[in-house]
Image (spheres, rainbow, N blue to C red):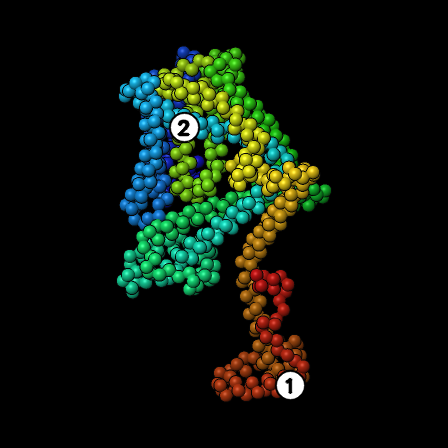
Amino acid sequence: MAFLRFHINLFKYPLYYVFPIVLAVYLPLSITFLLPTDYVSHVSGKPIQGFEISDNTTLMMWKSNYWSTFILTWLLLPVLQEYYRAGNYLKIMKLKTSLRQNLKFQAMVLLLSIAGGVYLILEKGLSLSSMKSMIISMSHIYALVLALWLMAHGLITIPRNRWNEGNILQNLNHYYLKVPKLVDTLEDTRISFKEDILQVLILKNNFTSSAVEENFAYRDWILNLANQVPSELEESVGRQYVHSDARSITREQLNEAFMNTLTYSFQGHMYKLRAYNSEYDTLLANVSRLQTLLEAKATEDPEERLRIMSSFGGLISPSANFYLQCYAKPVLARLLSIFLFVISFVIIQSEFFHSTKFSIVNIIVFKTGIHNHNLFQAIFSGILFLYMLFCSLNSLTRLKIFNMYHLVPGHSDPVSTCFYVSYIARLTIPLSYNFLTFFTDRSSIFEDWYGKSIHLTGLFDLMNSWVPRLLLVPVVLTTFNVYERLKKRIGLHSDMYGAWADFDDEEQLLNDENNMDSRNNRRELVIAEAKRTIAMELNRRNQTSRIHLRSFALQNAADSTYERNMQDFNLSLFGGINNRIDTYHDDNSTALVINADVQGLWSRLGGAVNNFKDAVQSRIARNSSYRDDPLDSYEYDEDAQENLVL
């Protein structure tokens, strides 16, 4: 529940959405407890003390968990995902659109099932049990391939990223190299979203009047979209585009298909902009923190160092925080990286030698005596399985599927949430069985039920045996950044693979005699541009904060200047040329009394005095060097003037 609450506000959605989402996360997490308990109890021949569960109860838990997950991932969650993706306004129409889209997907699955069924009939004959086993086996193979591929990427990138965190400058450059692509993507998304906002504002201005009967057809739909427009974008778009005749929408264009397309595009761009803004804010926070640490390490003045570190706050002193952030945490990150690399190597080796006595995991458990202690074996198995699952899910959350799905802390959209939780549930059970293959002895209720279902004949058994060994392929591709080279060759460049962004032209670099120098120069240019971009953004945000804080003081300064100029003018009019300045400076109270008398006189004589005043002012202006500066020419202090311009 905490994981879901961190990524999405569940209280704003109805129960028919919240319940499947929570269930799709709870069921996989329950397996992390059920799998070690089931396996250790049956391998050792005695239950774990305090966790005695009968075989019938364990079998029922496995079946209910599997079939609940199967229904969620193949039926309920896809329907919910398309329901919230649909551009329709009415709920019944959204449901119809969702069912229609899912029927197309299920038809494709049915064709694959028919092909698998024909193969199974030729191998074993047709029976109800064999058909059920075929469905389980096909689902298992699909999820296993995806889970192992994602896990292989996580086994390499997670320790690598922890190693990079051990060097503050290297970690800072890692973030800098992400900036240009993220800024470009953010601006492109903002422009696309503004185009959708423009259409919504035009519709709101032209087709939501209650006085026109024809407007009621889509009035609520349009107003619902208009209410979702962010206030800061609504003002800018309305000021720049809303009165453009070239962008008008005629009544003939306004139909259900047009509104469906607009709503689909509007929601998609809004979710993407929210995700990229969150990613950009996180990137700025990380860069600012690391840059502050570098400044603290570079300074030799202890007082200046404490002043810099005081910006971090916290419960410990700035001095202790300096040594913790700059020295202790990098060393711990490097040690953690080494530890995770060792675990990753153990898992990769065990995958390749699965179901044999050469598996390192099997050797650790059965050759070191851990299997003689149920609780220790259960803890070891649980931690190892959790790390495998975490590697897969970490890669899944970082995967950009055509930039359609994003997880945003606290503001994830329902479409992305359905996608990610469905695959969390889908990957867990195949990965659980894959974990059991690390051992030569797999005695368990899970093996007796699920293992027999997926072990058929021929092709199915061959895939079950060789898919884990093919884990070496994505491991090699990730280790040597082959994905980056392939993406450049085909013209793609996403955030999925490779911890370091690279903007070099591979073909040009290969033909360059100074390959390494050219690569380094391009990298330094990208970092320099990223530094400039982030510095401008942070400066803009700081100036915006100062403007809001100083707005009242600036207004007071303008008001006091206006009053002072009025006093000078009145004294020059009735106090004489030679003594008006002396009167203002030497006796301020007298000047105020004169000002009050003059204002009273004007109020009694009315407009006639105004004409006389103008004539006298013109006469004085011609005979004197005194000039009453208007408010626009008043020179504010430098800081206030800068803020006023902004």
Label 2 Cα crowd, 10 Å radius (few <14 / some 14-19 / many 20+): few
Q: Residue at x 55, y 31 (%)?
A: 478
Q: Quadrant of the N terminus?
A: top left
Q: Nearer the viewer, residue 274 or 12?
A: 274
Q: Residue at x 42, y 57 (%)?
A: 198
Q: Is residue 71 left or right of residue 524?
A: left
Q: Nearer the viewer, residue 551 or 503?
A: 503
- Residue 398 visible at all: yes
Picture quarter containing residue 61? top left
In the rendered image, the vertical position of residue 244 relative to residue 420, given as above or below: below
What amino acid type is highlighted by mark number 2? Tyr
Disc 1 target residue: 622
Q: Residue 210 location, x and y as percent?
A: 30, 62
Q: Residue 158 location, x and y as percent?
A: 54, 31
Q: Is residue 537 left or right of residue 87?
A: right
What amino acid type is highlighted by mark number 1? Arg
Give SS at disc 2.
Answer: helix
Give SS at disc 1.
Answer: helix
* In the image, farthest residue toward the right: 300
Q: Which mark is residue 142?
A: 2
